[in-house]
Image (cartoon, helix red, strand yellow):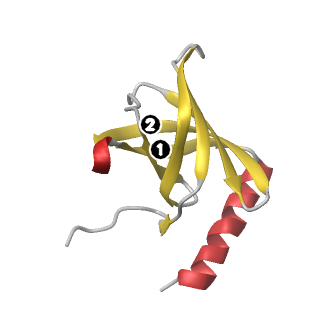
Amino acid sequence: MAENKRRHERYDSLNLLSYVCLDDEGKEWMQGMGRTLNISETGLQLETHEPIETKYIVLLSMGIEDDLVDIRGKVKYCNRGRENKFESGIEFYEVSPQAYKQLKNYIAEFHKTYGK
């Protein structure tokens, strides 16, 4: 079994979100909808119908409970998933204090309910 090198536990989570892909200069290249497959305090796995290149920064708008949370992340990988969809690893790097608090509360509830 491979060693888990993640700093934070990931929890299976299906949340719809919208995303916008930006290049290094802030130019918008594509946008779309997807859903989370899992989430942690530092990233998530995103399922989409189109591949997202690792050169992009993504702006994510995700519904967490009754709130809309905006997070900026970096695409670390993109692989073909099931049913002709794509799975991308997104590492968060710009999260407002309020959004981070909402994210942590959401994950804490997961841990309370489904934790090991």
As displayed, is residue 11 above or below residue 113? above
User: x, y (%) of residue 101?
Assistant: 75, 59
Marker disc for residue 75? 2
Is 28 situated above or below 4? above
Left or right: where 50 falls relative to 33: left
Front residue of this view, candidates 40 and 66: 66
Locate residue 84, reporting x and y percent: 30, 42
Q: In front: 56, or 42?
A: 56
Q: Quadrant of residue 72?
A: top right
Q: Residue at x 59, y 50 (%)?
A: 16
Question: Are the residues at dot 1 and dot 2 in contact (C-beta closer than 8 Å)?
Answer: yes
Mark 1 neighbour density, 10 Å: few (under 14) some (14–19) many (20 or more) = many
Q: Secondary structure at mark 1?
A: strand
Residue 87 is situated, as x and y percent measured from the top left of the image, at 37, 46
On the image, which quarter does residue 28 sit in?
Answer: top right
Side of 34 where 81 appears, left or right: left
Identify the image quadrant of the N terminus: bottom left
> In the image, is residue 10 above or below residue 88?
below
Under mark 2, the amino acid is Val
Q: Residue at x 58, y 78 (%)?
A: 111
Q: Which mark is residue 54?
A: none
**Amino acid found under the numbered disc labelled 1:** Ile
Mark 2: give few (<14), some (14-19) or many (20+) Cα within 10 Å.
many
Disc 1 or 2, which lies upstream in sequence? Answer: 2
Name the residue: 34% across, 39% down: 78
Of the numbered discs in the image, which one, if any, rests on residue 90?
1
* Alpha-carbon span between mark 1 and mark 2: 5 Å
The x and y percentages for residue 114 are: 54, 82
Q: Residue at x 62, y 83 (%)?
A: 112
* Mark 2 residue element: strand
Residue 81 appears in the rendering: no
